[in-house]
Amino acid sequence: MHSPTAVKAIKHETVSSIIEQLPLSKFHYFVVLAAGFGYMFDSFDTYLVAYAMPAVIKDWHISAVMTGMLTSAGMWGTFFGAIVWGPPTDKWGRKFGFAATVLGFSLVSAFTAFARTPNEFMVCRFLTGLCLGGELPIVSTMVAEYISVKHRGRFVAVLTVMWPFGLLAAAICALSMIPRYGWRPLFIVGALPAFLAFVIRKGVPESPRWLAIKGRTEEAKAVLRKLGASDEQLETIMQEEVSGKVPFSTLLREPYLKRFIATAGAFFFAYVGYYGYSLWLPTILVTVYNLSLVKTFTYTLCVACASILGKLTSFYTIEKFGRLQVFYVGYGLGGVVALLFGLIKDPAYLLPTACILGYLLEIGVSGNIVWTPELYPSKIRGTANNWSAAAGKLSAAAAPLLFGYFLARHFYYGIWLTMAVCFAITLVLVATLGIETKGKTLEEIGAA
């Protein structure tokens, strides 16, 4: 016979409440490791075009405007990809979306190496972006649903730590390969992440929270058992209310309208500066400051190392000081440094300033990635996270065109001024519409 305490547990236990009780296990770390590699490979394939572009310009003798079009093609793909992959992720699961996007961008990257004209190159980068744009928000959504409130912020933040490693790998490959073999082998290397799709398919289970809202309670129990739940805990799980089809208009109504404006707006304005800077930095160093390709890649390699330090800083501080403080430090100070960067005349100051700016921007982006999936319930978390990220991809696609326009007209300070203004708008949105989620369960946030 059950005690009164046991009866109460049987009546009220859910998948979410059990997740909050579980200590970290080896399987938690395995899932996060797979997700982290997804982030790293996404970064690697994203930045290949930035490092290849100086060589592509010389190979095909293209203009600054065409350079901006080629650079932004992948970003336009990520915009549409983030929109397209959101609803399927809520309908068919996080695992499906994760594996499909990784396989997609890996295979198309290989085809890019055989592009014969700028137009073919542009099409390949757009198709690559369709998958790159969907993968990141899918991964952060999945990890946020696996982890308890005690560790959620850091475990999602650690994904972003892997992002600069992809940037670092792209810089190393570019430095070692382009001077000898040209830009095409870079994109062959970009196909290597395809093996991760196999690992996901065989080893990564579906999100237990997503399974629960789809009425697949037994499958959710099986996943919880892998995560360390006891048979006694699993016996207490009640069948949760099955979520039907959720209309997209849900994001445009209370209680999610203000949240969606805040998350989508923060992505949109922050990514103008973030991607404009990171994608154009190699070209700016070559065309504005007349650095050699080898010196340019060496500088960007140093920036990648500084970016890793930025992600590590956010990893260690996001649970201590909160999500909103990460925005304020990263983008607030980043805007100031951007304005100073535009005033540099002496090349000796380029490297330290570029590293400081890269460090700060990675801190700010961690806020976008960790904060957004915490604000929405599982029934629409995938769509909300993907569509918020899509706003950022839209601005990231436009930024190279805008920065290319400034470069073509030799209005170089326009780049840094645009970055500072966009970061300021980001902070206003977060401060006025945002809520702090540190230390709160999804139920307390209103996103169970």
Image: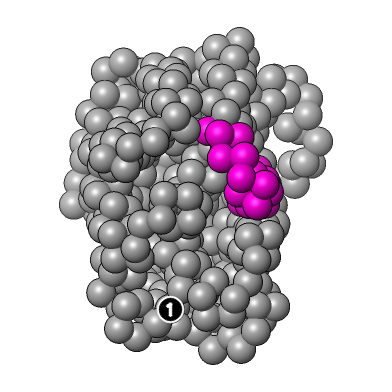
Residue at (59% x, 76% y) in the render: 61
Q: Looking at the picture, which amino acid does disc 1 mark? A: Trp
Instruction: Tell me how many marks there are.
Output: 1
Quarter placement of the N terminus: top left
Q: Residue lying at the far top in this picture: please name it.
A: 432
Residue at (32% x, 53% y) in the render: 300
* Residue bounds of the magenta highlight: 394-416
> In x, y percent, where is residue 274?
49, 40
> In x, y percent, where is residue 335?
47, 24
**Residue that badge 1 annotates:** 183
**From what the image shows, is residue 96 above or below residue 6?**
below
User: Left or right: where does residue 384 sit relative to residue 210?
Assistant: right
**From what the image shows, is residue 258 above or below residue 385?**
above
Q: Quadrant of residue 292?
A: bottom left
> In x, y percent, where is residue 20?
33, 30
Residue at (63% x, 60% y) in the render: 64
User: Left or right: where does residue 287 sit relative to residue 357?
Assistant: right
